[in-house]
Image (spheres, helix red, strand yellow):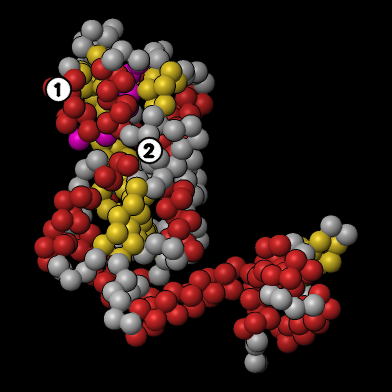
Amino acid sequence: MRLDLFSLKLFVDIVEERSIGKGAAKNCIAMSAASKRMSDLEQKLGAPLLLRQSRGVVTTGAGDTLYKGMTETLSRLAQLAAAVGDTANGVQRPVRVLANLTSLARDLPASLKAFAALHPAVAVELDEQPTAATLQAVSRGDADLGIVAPIVPYPPNIVAFRYRVMRHVLVVPANHPLAAAASVTFDMVARHDIVSLENEGGWDSLLRKAAEERGSGWHVRARVGSFDAVCRLVASGFGVAIVPSPTADLHAEALGLRVLALDEPWAELPLDVCVRDVATLAPDARQLLDHLRRRTPAGVRSMAGFLFPKPVPERASRGFADSTSSH
């Protein structure tokens, strides 16, 4: 079977534009020529791909399968072309890493520093992104590695490995009614004003899910973009907050905060390092993946969180579709 790459790219554009005419215009060909190419493609594949409707086109089941496969293929071809061009011009492409706030609060910076010492010739670009955005970027091939929390379903083409488990605690001002408690439940926390991260982010979704499961309301008095800012607002009396324990340890003494244990199964939140395809990773990115996996503490892979299924031992864990992104 001989498939025309231009026609396949045209098909992807038509699906995304929901219009043969707009897809044709995007590729600088006539609508009639685009329609003919789609008919020829359907004939070669032996299946209808598009349903023509009054408001545009939609994919059939076969068309949806082709679209998903071609978006991956086109992304890989673009990466390949960029890599060939970089090699020809003597340009070293950096390993692109996206990570959530929680991973940056603990071991990831030290892990990357150790990697740089071992591989000084490898450039690494690190960007903080919420889990959902990171998963999309890795799935599209726009990032090599992502550090995420399994608080949203993982795309089916993502492979994830358990990296760390992060303990979360409650921070309160020293004069707060909860300050004398040894530990607290979420029900106790939800009775007070809360300082949290951005609305509709992963951390926000996790807390909302916890509240919904208990049938309790919760009031977020302030939202900010980092856990450091969260701690400063708590110190000023805006409310209480659930933060990673390393962040609490860093700020507690300087800001006069009380750190309380959080008596909830999800207080221990897994962190995963994810890639799209281990086999097709660039050598530098594969070195970094292996480095991060070697630095995973013993026993972490067997730990299971409250909202998250237990990962299968010695195998890459896929997404956690049953779970409920700044995280």
Residue with the mark numbered 2? 306
The question of residue 243 being in magenta is answered with: yes
Residue with the mark numbered 1? 254
Q: Which residue: 47% across, 24% down?
A: 211
Where the N terminus falls, by quadrant? bottom right
State the image coordinates of residue 64 (x, y, percent, origin top left).
67, 67
State the image coordinates of residue 15 (x, y, percent, origin top left).
70, 66
Q: Is residue 125 left or right of residue 56?
A: left
Is residue 70 visible in the rendered image? The answer is: yes
**Residue at mark 2 to residue at mark 1: CA–CA distance:** 32 Å
State the image coordinates of residue 36 (x, y, percent, origin top left).
81, 82
Q: Secondary structure at mark 2?
A: loop
Q: Quadrant of residue 210?
A: top left
Between label 2 and label 1, give the one nearer the viewer: 1
Magenta-highlighted residues:
239-246
Could you classify mark 2 by the number of other residues whose Cα lies within 10 Å: few (under 14), some (14-19), or many (20 or more)? few
